[in-house]
Image: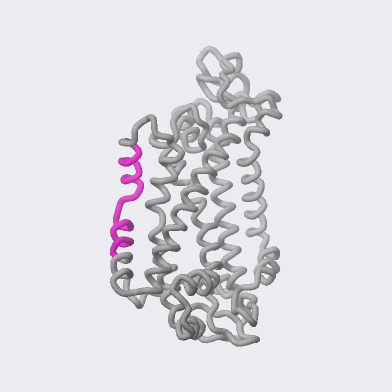
Amino acid sequence: MSETDAAPDVPVAGDLLPGDRLSPIGDETTSAPVAAIDPDSGRVVPGGVWSRLRHNGSAMFGAVVVVLTTLVAILATPITRAMDLDPYSYDLSALNASGLPSGAMGGISAVHPFGVEPQTGRDLFAIVVEGTRTSFLIGMGATILSMTIAIIVGVTAGYFGGWWDGLASRGTDVILGFPQLVFMIAISAVIPATAPRATVMVLIIGLLGWPSTARVLRSQAMSLRSRTFIRASQAMGAGHLHILVRQMLPNLVATIIVFITISIPGKIGAEAALSFLGVGVTPPTPSWGRSIGSAVTWVSTDPWYLLFPGGALFLVTLAFNLFGDGLRDAIDPRLGESR
């Protein structure tokens, strides 16, 4: 990465005067209608972002789906118990002689709302609900790990520069050069079977998922370090840790939040891909990706088996992306106007 890398149009507050409005990095302040700014701190005002976000129908739809899915992930076990369903219990009476679900539409009934799994008769509703927790825990854990690394590496590289910036940049380039899915499969395949697979998935996906975000944060930190308020803090004797934590990070919060909302569905999708390929969580642990992988075998005879786990993965990925796009536009409305 070079010092001329362009930062994306995610707003970063700088040394603003009262009444100024936030503009993309590198531009002068302008009176254009962009993100609401606290005239004292120059930071994005949450109320201003919310007022724009709630008028964005697709973003609010995404937010509602994200909240509901998060609640399902948290309350997965109470939900299945309340319905007297168990993702690990076999119900062979729900299968015909060929091992396929009895009845129409994959065995959908009052007892099994989403039907049952071929060959085992396990309830598909319970599998999808419990799989929500598995996929969310891995996706959220990997996102937290990757964002933590990206913030530490990107912000410090952009602030300090020099040899550390060069080392961090080359390390980022090397990791981005990996064929990540192939690398994840190779690592997963050699992990001992006794290792906790969910933890392994978090580590593999998280440790390989930070470079792109680190690049953006580095570019924005480089812009921030030349701003007047950073130089004033240095002139007054503020330490590096104080500047990074109290000056840099608060002005990068908007960027970090947007990247988190965009990163989570990617991490959930990575877990689903690994489970689909048979190197993710091990049976009988419920997982959307594992269910989709199993359903492919039965798609010609029982397409309903693929519909529900595949639909859940699609809906959650779409919801996070809609919410992330809407949040980005709410932080800087000119991004939406330019599209």
Viewer-nearest residue: 325 or 101: 325
Please provide percent x and percent y for residue 26. 46, 82
Please provide percent x and percent y for residue 127. 57, 31
Residue 227 at least partly seen: no
What span is colored magenta in the figure?
Answer: 170-189
Is 231 drawn above or below residue 271 in the view shown? below
* Quadrant position of the C terminus in the picture: bottom right
Is 173 drawn above or below residue 276 in the view shown? below
Residue 29 occupies which quadrant of the picture?
bottom right
* Quadrant position of the N terminus in the picture: bottom left
Please provide percent x and percent y for residue 137. 53, 43
For the point 44% across and 55% down, which residue is it? 146
Residue 249 at least partly seen: yes
Viewer-nearest residue: 298 or 38: 38
Is 326 drawn above or below residue 282 in the view shown? below
Number of labels in the image equals 0
For the point 57% across and 41% down, which residue is it? 312
- Single out the residue that lies furthest toward the top: 97
For the point 63% across and 80% down, which residue is it? 33
For the point 48% across and 31% down, which residue is it? 295
Q: Main secondary structure of the magenta part?
A: helix
Task: Answer whether residue 186 is magenta in the image.
Answer: yes
Is 311 drawn above or below residue 302 in the view shown? below
Task: Answer whether residue 80 is magenta in the image.
Answer: no
Please provide percent x and percent y for residue 278. 39, 34
Question: Does 180 sit left or right of 87 as displayed?
Answer: left
Residue 17 occupies which quadrant of the picture?
bottom right
